[in-house]
Image: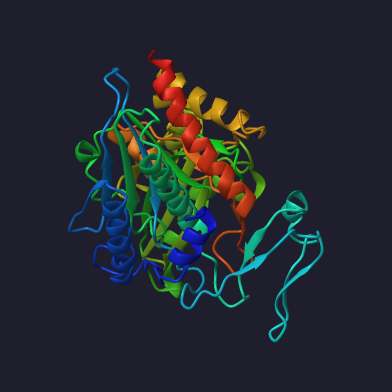
């Protein structure tokens, strides 16, 4: 089966995840596709299991006696809660002519290269688009389809030598829980790649170091009519706290490698105010310095207004995978070469967020991210280049060849 046919088949499943859910996976409907994928792996002669959490793990035993490292390929089946994933009705545009694509005449929704400049790069390619009513689910069913097509290729080409290969399909990535219950031991790989990026040629191995800070300001509420020298308005102190942080480090005025502190929630009254920040930076030292700024601001206010005025809690969320990958240059180089061998220009821009790969890297499984050929994720303007999907499969084959030949 062709990679895009496979994608169209998976797209039929509604696999939207739900951030409000208390269950795992967050929605039961994801299980339907995961079950189907397990069966498909069975049919391709792969030793596949699905655990109670829904993780599908397929193992392809090495067919070479040489000592080659074990690799895993990972993609997620859920689609974003940001847009409907029900009754997706994809359409193929053959030989794209570079003009506006009318997605849905009735509701007047058009995918235009004037707005989405990246379309200009796909003239002459075959594209898959939505009907304007749902997202497409290329994120990340394109990755799932590419991995599965690679598995099928190995099944039909027993002459292609390979080491141990594990394929992993996960639920709930879009709600930040894709790796929550993942069994790294069972995956049993030396390193891995997630296929969950956009442009095929994307190779992402740098992401933010991330922490969350909760600041609680305790004030003293007194009737405003008789408040002189008695009241401590926690709202005013909270604003003072924020002013003590560097003003140039905000998401709205930073980009690329520039980190930020972001106040994303603030609620309170005279008596008590709670502020929630996220702290982000690619650079470990600057990340530590930002956290120090929070501690200093808190200490300053406690000195000024009394020791129990400000209560601060900082919790790290995830770290930049680059540091862990630096001792493992070959993992990057293998992917870089595989991309170049397809005559594609590799792009290694830093991610301004986190990835499942970053979490896996710190769990002990080094895991950069590769592109899948999907664009404009999480909404009706999402589209997928069939040509790029095919190249993504070639990149997987090449990664395997390099792993085998590197050790010879
Ligand atoms: Zn994704």
Quarter of the view holding residue 150: top left
Q: Is 83 drawn above or below residue 387 in the view shown?
A: below
Viewer can see residue 326: no
In the current view of this chain or complex, which residue is farthest to the bottom?
106
In the current view of this chain or complex, which residue is farthest to the left?
52
Residue drawn 46% across and 45% down?
Answer: 195
Quarter of the view holding residue 379: bottom right
Viewer can see residue 327: yes
| Total marks placed | 0
Q: Is 85 drawn above or below residue 171 in the view shown?
A: below
Q: Residue 324 appears at what percent x and percent y?
A: 39, 25
Q: Nearer the viewer, residue 73 or 209?
A: 73
Q: Nearer the viewer, residue 242 or 115?
A: 115
Q: Is 390 drawn above or below residue 51 in the view shown?
A: above
Which quadrant does the C terminus fall into?
A: top left
Q: Residue 26 appears at what percent x and percent y?
A: 30, 66
* Type of colouring: rainbow
Residue drawn 42% across and 32% down?
Answer: 321
Q: Residue 330 appears at what percent x and percent y?
A: 45, 20
Q: Nearer the viewer, residue 208 or 196?
A: 196
Residue drawn 41% across and 24% down?
Answer: 403
């Amino acid at each position: 089966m062709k990679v895009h046919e496979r994608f169209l088949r998976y797209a039929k499943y509604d696999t939207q995840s739900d951030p409000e859910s208390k269950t795992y996976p967050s929605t039961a409907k994801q299980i339907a596709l995961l079950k189907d994928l397990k069966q498909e792996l069975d049919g391709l002669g792969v030793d596949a299991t699905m655990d109670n959490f829904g993780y599908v793990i397929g193992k392809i035993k090495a067919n070479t006696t040489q000592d080659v490292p074990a690799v895993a390929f990972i993609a997620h089946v859920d689609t974003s809660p940001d847009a409907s994933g029900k009754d997706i009705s994809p359409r193929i545009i053959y030989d794209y002519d570079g003009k506006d694509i009318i997605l849905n005449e009735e509701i007047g929704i058009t995918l235009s290269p004037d707005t989405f400049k990246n379309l200009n790069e796909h003239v002459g390619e075959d594209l898959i688009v939505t009907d304007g009513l749902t997202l497409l689910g290329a994120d990340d069913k394109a990755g799932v389809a590419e991995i599965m097509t690679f598995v099928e290729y190995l099944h039909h080409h027993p002459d292609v030598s390979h080491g141990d290969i594990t394929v992993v399909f996960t639920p709930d990535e879009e709600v930040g829980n894709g790796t929550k219950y993942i069994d790294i031991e069972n995956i049993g790989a030396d390193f891995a790649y997630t296929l969950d990026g956009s442009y095929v040629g994307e190779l992402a191995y740098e992401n933010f170091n991330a922490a969350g800070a909760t600041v609680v300001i305790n004030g003293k509420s007194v009737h405003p009519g008789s408040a002189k020298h008695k009241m401590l308005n926690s709202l005013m102190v909270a604003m003072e706290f924020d002013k003590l942080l560097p003003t140039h480090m905000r998401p709205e005025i930073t980009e690329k490698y520039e980190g930020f502190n972001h106040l994303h929630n603030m609620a309170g009254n005279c008596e008590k105010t709670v502020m929630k920040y996220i702290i982000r930076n690619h650079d470990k030292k600057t990340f530590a310095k930002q956290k120090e700024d929070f501690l200093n601001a808190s200490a300053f206010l406690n000195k000024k207004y009394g020791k129990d005025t400000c209560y601060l809690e900082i919790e790290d969320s995830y770290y930049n995978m680059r540091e862990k990958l630096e001792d493992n240059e070959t993992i990057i180089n293998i992917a870089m070469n595989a991309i170049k061998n397809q005559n594609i220009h590799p792009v290694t821009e830093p991610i301004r967020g986190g990835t499942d790969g970053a979490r896996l890297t710190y769990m002990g499984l080094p895991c950069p991210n590769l592109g899948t050929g999907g664009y404009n994720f999480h909404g009706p303007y999402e589209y997928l280049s069939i040509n790029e999907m095919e190249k993504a499969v070639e990149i997987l084959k090449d990664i395997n060849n390099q792993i085998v030949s590197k050790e010879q």
